[in-house]
Amino acid sequence: MDFFASYVVLAEIYVLLALSTNLLVGVVGIFSVSQAAVFGVGAYIVSDFLLTDTMGFLPATAIAIVACVVLNILTTLPSLRVAGDYFVVTSFGIQLLATAGFTNWTEGTGGANGLPGIPPAELFGFQLATTLQYLELSTIAAVLGCLCFWLVMRAPFGRLLRAIREDELAVAAAGKGVLHAKVSAAALAGAYAGVAGGLYATFMSFIDPSSFDLDASILLLSMVVLGGMRTLSGSIIGPFLLLALPQVLTLVALPTSVAAAFRQLIYGVLLIAFMLFRPQGLAGERL
Amino acid sequence: MLALQLLLNGIVTGCALGVVAVSFALVYATTKIFHVAHAGVYTLGGYVAWSLAVRGVPDPLALVLAMAVCTALGALIQHQLYGRLERRGATHLGILIASLGALAVIQNLIAAVYSANILQFPSAWASRTFGFGGLRLSAAQIATLVISLIAVAAVLWFARATILGKRIRAVASNPFLAEITRLEPRTVHVYVVAIASAVVCLPGVLVPFDLGLQPYGGITPLLTATIAMIAGGIGSLGGAFVLSVVIVVLQNLSLLVMPGEWSIGVTFFIFVIFMLFRPRGLFANA
């Protein structure tokens, strides 16, 4: 039961991350392989504040959200200003830079050994010690996140974002603020990553750079592609299915050294197969 | 002296990276695909050559065979993946995601078969060093320098002087016109990616002679190469090469003032500077 509950908690945290990726990649159409880096910054900020006992969970998460919003806007800024594939370079660059930072800035991040012993979250003097209590928190966060996404997609703002993906020039010609809309979308995506970072760090109580590297970004992208781009249901299906995959793979006896590579291999195959045969994903909008 | 040695190392590695940049620029200018999986082809070349070398195949032969494998892989990716996606009217983003998927598949297949540890070539000749008035170069570095320069010269000559090269440039400059004049852009695209894959195999094999092989080692060179391509001006193969050398030399010289883990930061900083002041690159064609 506990095992299943922790699977659901993790999946719900990844739902927030998938929404963040979906908003950028699916809705606005900005290619991004750096969402895991933004997620990592959120997680490390919350961990550092909690470990040094500077402040509680809520203010720490609030600061993490602000940092992630700013970082995500900076990350997507090149795609706002210049056309072409330059943003692919920035996205890869930010991700590699973040991994270098997480691994080498030992004072703040514990380096490759990570940060152990992160205290559990405390909300209004009530400590969340067990997995089931976390399940409540993460469910609330995921439901709020989904609600927010749903509302944004229904609002004129959501239509504006989708219109930008279809034809940016036409939107600009119609007198809409393309730059402003993209910055807002990037900010919202950053906020999702910040919340997810805080939840992830306190739930796992241990973080290391391997959770926030390029492979993690590819996992997020696979979740969105598998579930389906642009839709809320896609971002919920994707994480739940792909996080179950490692459990299924434990049934196949693989040596641990191969298992991680094998998992990433499957994500890669999924990306290719879905792009070839079902680009809209399991529950996405028709392209 | 240290600065001079770093400068020299930078020029050698920069030339190798220049080959990556030129091959990537060739693909990008012609197919307009941001071929991320190129990093996988680069890595695979090294591993194929390594597997042959440890089984006693002479190194030059191993290099040629690795190039053949890379050529086939490149043609396969273009023909079966990008070509199909384009025929189905996939978006640019969709092709990019598929390319990233191909990269993940190649890298992790390698990691699953060879493990993620660093592998060294068994060849004795590569580590022999030569001194030039206090500066030292290993045989592998000299081979890298010479072969890279020849390769870049060959690619530039090929694009300028041969029939196929002219056809490629025609497709690159106007795909629509190339289509109606029966230059068959789709076939040309397959040729281009195949040729670029063969070319990128050279640094893919030669650099590991010096630095060893890693399954995930292709992304950083590719990222640096793409930055060099953008800074040099998209469409200018020579510009991509020159900027690669400049960027790697700057990276190496930065070792004098900061630890090597942050050299990716230096590269990225150069990119941002270019984005701000010269977004079209130094040698951009109009």
Image (tube, coloured by chain):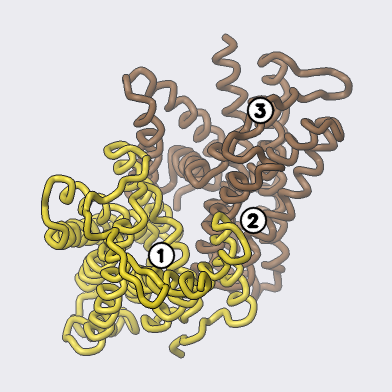
Subunit ID for the residue under disc 3: A
> What secondary structure is found at the residue carrying circle 3?
loop
Left or right: A163 in relation to B146: right
Q: Quadrant of the rendered structure where residue B234 is?
A: bottom left
Which of the labelled discs sits on residue A93, or is there none? Answer: none
Apparent colour of chain B: yellow
Apparent colour of chain A: brown
- In percent of width and height, residue A165 lies at 56, 61
- In percent of width and height, residue B169 lies at 28, 83
Label 3 neighbourhood size at 10 Å, few (<14), some (14-19), many (20+)? some
Closer to the observer: label 2 or label 1? 1
| Residue A192 visible in the shown view | no
The reply to whether the C-beta atoms of the residues labelled 2 and 1 are less than 8 Å apart is: no
Which of the labelled discs sits on residue A116, or is there none? Answer: 3
Closer to the observer: label 3 or label 1? 3
The reply to whether the C-beta atoms of the residues labelled 3 and 1 are less than 8 Å apart is: no
Label 1 neighbourhood size at 10 Å, few (<14), some (14-19), many (20+)? many
Subunit ID for the residue under disc 1: B
Residue at image point 51% right, 63% down:
A89
Label 2 neighbourhood size at 10 Å, few (<14), some (14-19), many (20+)? some
| Residue B187 visible in the shown view | yes
Residue at image point 26% right, 62% down:
B201
Residue at image point 28% right, 55% down:
B81
Q: Amino acid at mark 2?
A: Arg
Give the residue number, with chain letter if any, for mark 2.
A159
